[in-house]
Image (cartoon, rainbow, N blue to C red):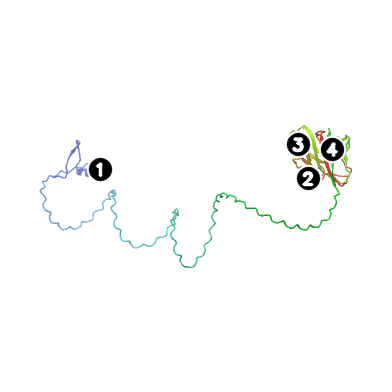
Amino acid sequence: MSTHRRFKSSGKKKLCEYKKRRFRKCKATRKKHKCPTPIIKMIGPTGPTGPTGPTGPAGPQGTTGTTGLIGLQGEQGPQGAQGIVGPMGQNGLTGATGTTGVTGITGVTGATGATGAGAAGVTGATGSTGTTGVTGVTGVTGATGVTGVTGATGATGVTGITGVTGATGVAPTTSTKVILFGGTSEGFQKVASSPGAVSNILPYVVAGTTGTIVGISGSFSINNLQPGVYLYEICKNVTNNAVSPLPANIISTITIVLTAAITGTVIFSSRPSDGEGVPTANVLVSNGAPYVLAPATISWTSTIIGNPITRDNALSLFINPNITQSASYAVFINTAI
């Protein structure tokens, strides 16, 4: 029978297998191929296979054909048995050290082995001190224990012998005197013993030797005294017709600073020892109730350093601005008589 067959499909003439192979092979040249005329032979039953003839001599090796397309990789077969390990090759050159990997989790500490014998190694250098940890929260203070019983008082010791009396000190040669002034309707106040004239006309005369002015105190009754600055000036040797003292006449200046209006009886005092120019709260007021601090301060200024006075100084008191007739003042001096 012919190895070539024609067949019909969908009404179109198809190529035989031979032509298909030839057509694919020469597709680039688009050549037409003719199929050889099939020879029809009657094939009888196959006879027994004859003995194999001797192998003929090998023909010359043909030219190597073009390498065909690489086929798809087949499925991986089962792994073969491991071969015998070959001899170890020479060590290659050490490669560059790789980047240190992340430190793994520390494993469980194994049991401590027996201590080996041998000389102690050299002690390594002490490592750096670690950072001090955060201080913990202070615990709650415990309750105070019960106070113990007070012990019995011991017996009083024997009184010691009285020491020898010291020598009598030198008698003081100075003493403090007070000069009283009464209120007036003008700046100069009057000496308390005066028949009516103010202290620039009838002053207090110092009889002792050299001394100092050591303080002032006073009181006055007033209705609605307004806030302001009120000056008390202790003067010496003011002319008898002066309206106000000259700067050279002023020994000491006492300043009252009033910050709010007050009504009632006001009392005050001041001394050089209170501090030069230092305001103090030594001003009090009573208005139908006990004395309380007034809304005021008072300070002492030594206009002449040391507040000196001497024998035959004519002392007077001047208030600027004048406050009231209903007033009494005391100036304290310290002299030898």
Instruction: State the residue position of label 4.
Output: 181
Q: Counting residues from the N terminus, which is met first, the one under dot 2 or under dot 3? A: 2
Query: In the picture shown, does residue 182 fall above or below 114?
Result: above
Q: How far apart are marks 3 and 1 (CA)?
A: 135 Å
Tag 3–tag 1 contact (CB < 8 Å) = no
The mark nearer the N terminus, 4 or 2, is 4
| In the foreground, 282 or 143 | 143
Q: For residue 27, which numbered disc appears in the image? A: 1
Of residues 134 and 203, the one nearer the viewer is 203
Residue kind at label 2, given as amino acid type:
Ser
Mark 1 or mark 2, which has the lower sequence index? Answer: 1
- Residue type pointed to by label 1: Lys
Q: What residue type is labelled 4?
A: Phe
Q: Which of marks 2 and 3 is in front?
A: 3
How far from the left and from the top, in percent, is residue 306? 82, 45
Dot 3 crowding, Cα within 10 Å, few <14, some 14–19, many 20+: many
Q: Name the residue under label 2.
A: 273
